[in-house]
Image (cartoon, helix red, strand yellow):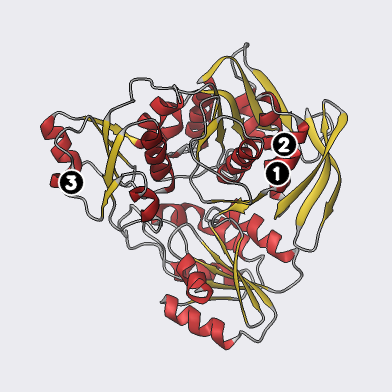
Amino acid sequence: MSYDNGLKGKNIYMTGIAGSSMSGIAFILSDIGCTVSGSDRSLPKDVASFESRGIKVYNNHAAENIPANCDILVYTAAVDSNNPEIIEARRRGIEILSRAEFLGRVIDCFGTRIGVAGTHGKSTTSSMIATCMADSAKQFSYNVGCIIRADVDMPVSAGEDYFVFEACEYRDSFLSFHSDVAVILNIELEHLDYFHNIDQILKSFGKFSDNLSQGGKLVINMDDRNTRLVADHVRPDVKVITCSATDATADYYPTNVEYDEDACASYTIHEQGKPAAKVRLRIPGDHNIINSLCACAAMRAAGLSWGEIVDGILHFHGSGRRFDYKCNLGNLAIYDDYAHHPSEIRASINTAKRLNKPVLVVFQPHTFSRTKHLMKDEAAALSLADQVILVDIYAAREEDPGDVNSQMVSDLISRRGGNSTYMASFEEVQEYMLSVANQEMTVITMGAGDVYKIADYFAK
């Protein structure tokens, strides 16, 4: 690889190296000739992939971990300013950059930069694009926040012509990124520990679109009102490309939608009003129709042929923790899903319903602030399931304010006529699942915290 942007040969230390995005950055840095090391509170599952690249990983945060000749310290958003490694880097005068700031510097090393933003669907859509790039042997690299499930080799750095990345709006991190092709899938009220209202979020997405290069292309889901509002105010030189699941006036839309026994859709995609290709998805759910339409539009804007796109999509089997089949327990088919926002919860449950079995959701609310502000919407979405089990709120970066809990969500569901129970531990949930294993049900462990451990317990 010939790209550099001042990074080649640097000694870079990464605080919080085990996260999906941070580890991907570490691998890219190693491949371009940087010396990389880092730390996390627990060693990553794929520690061998770090070691094979000569990346030293520590399982604690400590000042002495930082090498003597460190040039840059990169930290993840989960780390605060009182972290001992950040304090030490500050004391030694080492350049300190957030993950987003540093990733922005990495992204700018590449040719065509494709960024995928939106409240929901970013990981799936960017992963689909990356899979098509890999399948068509493009010279590209990528950075997404999940494991990509594909039957094609997916090296994170395979060239400099393209860079595919997930652009997350949390704490305005995506404002550090510049794109040549940008995708906005949808815009909703979210991350309420940072954003105050939808107007603030809309302004942030507007700034994200402002970061498009001169003559850049913005792909939008025109079915989403807030996304249209942002697109209405882009610079005159930016070309807006529209996608819709239902509107034939869009630049890209589907016809002849069909579903297989696994709830995966296939459809004819239309480009500028004309049938262009037959798209077959290997991931379930209605919501993935618009995700795939936007992915196709972005790839066309980046110059891929329909043959490359259609073949690549066939090799994409999904993203980790996105309606992810884990195992069968007796007659229970167990899935795991990252869904934690009401719209995501609704999409996941509706996907499960296409499998024509009763749906049991084990839901772990994510953060106290989100639960407090969106509790009624969460309860309404969860009420779509035949049965719901609530476990304790996953605090993540927050302290418990004492005025919101999972029992309150469960009570709201029950008042709506739903079947909901609160259980105090994962072990209690596991025991219950064993007791009903003879029943035909689709079970989803759901949430952005560690609820996946319940499904993993049975998948061992």
Question: In the image, 451: left or right of 437?
Answer: left
Q: Is 277 on the left-hand or right-hand side of 403?
A: right
- Residue 328: x and y in percent read 62, 76
Give the Cα distance between marks 1 and 3: 42 Å
Camera sees residue 266: yes
Q: Is residue 194 visible?
A: no
Q: Real-space Cα distance between discs 3 and 2?
A: 44 Å
Q: Position of residue 23 (x, y in %)?
A: 39, 45
Label 2 residue SS: helix
Query: Mark 1 or mark 3, which has the lower sequence index?
Result: 3
Q: Which residue is mark 1?
A: 313
Q: Which residue is mark 2?
A: 309
- Where does label 3 land, which residue? 65
The residue at the point 40 percent across, 32 percent down is 103
- State how far apart marks 1 and 2 are (Cα): 6 Å
Write the residue at 56% across / 59% down. Answer: 378
Within 10 Å of disc 3 (Cα), the crowding (few <14, some 14-19, many 20+) is many
